[in-house]
Amino acid sequence: MVDVETKHSELVRTIRWTDAFWIASGVPALLVFSVGYIAVLDGPVSVLIWFASVLIGLAMAFVYAEMAGMFPEKSGGPPVFGAQAWKRYFRPIAPLSIWGYWFAWSPVLAIGGLLMGSYIEAEWFPGQTWSADWTITASFGFHFNFAFVVGAAILVGLFWLNHFGIKESAWMQRVLAVVSLVPLGLMIIVPVFQGKVNLSNLTPFTVPNAHGWHVFALICAGLFVAAWSAYAFETAVVYTAEFKNPQRDTPRAIFASGGLCLFFYGLGPFILYAVVGGKAIEQDPSTALVPLANAVFGTAGALLIALLLVALLLSVNTAILGSSRTLYQASKDSWTFRFMQYTSRRGVPLKAMGFDVIFNLFLMMLGNPIYILAASTVGYMIFNVLNLVAGYLLRKDAPSAQRPYRAPTTMIRLGVVLAAVNLVLLFVGAPSWGWSYVGLGWLIVLAGIVIYYYRAWSDRRGAPERVPVGAAPLAGGEES
């Protein structure tokens, strides 16, 4: 039996803000997941939805950058920082926010794995049509097929590649980003010089087949799912405890990542709709960028599919790196299961990463990627509502605390307004994607509170655990 003193529970400070920027560069590729579905849902108005969504994300980044600088010793991102504010008011809100954030990011593994498996099957193994299904109810069951096997192999492969360390993972992300984002960027820029941007495709500029309240509800539904992608560059501050200079690196990482997303999310959906039009997108929303690539480069072919796979791989790796660190820090701070607080000798949270992979292998057996995305967005919106308020509470309750980056007071107050906006999107926009998946999202997020109470009971019941070698007290005497 391994002595607890041989266990490691500390991450390693080996990266700079540029490394976090490359890790977060998988966020623009998330556009691939839902741009087609939102275009079908909201028609030409979808181009404004994406632009508004990324601007909201940039506004929220001011709050999250300040919070990250206050807790340079903590990994896991904004919900971990926000937990420090909520625990003095009502402790269960902290695990609710943390679990919501984790469930927002983690299903990227399942969605990306399924999409990659499906693309590989369609392009190179069309004869692999076998499947094994276990139906439990009329609407629920487990499905095994070739796409699942390929996707599962990819997740396991990424788990192995990332066990070498965060520095090596950042280099891998840099290569994947250059290979995938450069062609995606060219698809956005080249049509302008080719004269293929046709503004008539955006007319009439209305939400199709909707009137009155239904228009508002569909716009909220679009903003709801767009947020899952366009806000997501806050993942750049998940690695605070691994920055060599966290006070300087955190704001640089998040604002640089936000600028990259402003380009892709601000221009990408506009170019897509203006070049190919709504009818071409409707034919297959899951591959909406294929007709754009055909229009720009002349052919989709195997090369285009390969580049799309690299973009999906980039996004999945961003998710596995970020969500595992959220679980690691949550475990270390006693918000969730104890076993995930340990790291490998290289400073990698392998147990948290393994939990992520196993959970997503289960999700991959359940079904349609867009509905998994809708369920996970429930968690993301819950997190954003609670964490924007937490930023305000930290400013109010600890006004003299050290803040290497201090956001303008106006942006902290605006954060509370945006919390209200996200609350509206959660309750007005989410139902358009189906109550069953919204309910699944709530169920998984609320499970975080149950797990927190189990952890608290377990800690009281067991003997005090010896502090692992290398563990350091929290800066400033903050309790975990």
Image (tube, rainbow, N blue to C red):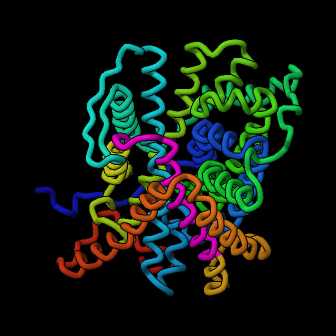
Q: Is residue 298 left or right of residue 328?
A: right
Q: Residue at x 29, y 49 (%)?
A: 137
Q: Nearer the viewer, residue 169 or 447?
A: 447
- Residue 162 visible (yes or no): yes
Q: Is residue 282 left or right of residue 366?
A: right
275 shown above or below 230: above
Q: Main secondary structure of the magenta part?
A: helix
Residue 286, position in %: x, y? Answer: 57, 33
Which portion, as a residue range, is magenta?
Answer: 364-391
Residue 447, position in %: x, y? Answer: 36, 67
Q: Residue at x 71, y 54 (%)?
A: 219
Q: Residue furthest left?
A: 1
> Picture quarter containing residue 422?
bottom right
Count of picture labels: 0
Q: Quadrant of the N terminus?
A: bottom left
Q: Nearer the viewer, residue 108 or 82?
A: 108
Q: Residue at x 79, y 74 (%)?
A: 410
Magenta-drawn stretch contains 389: yes
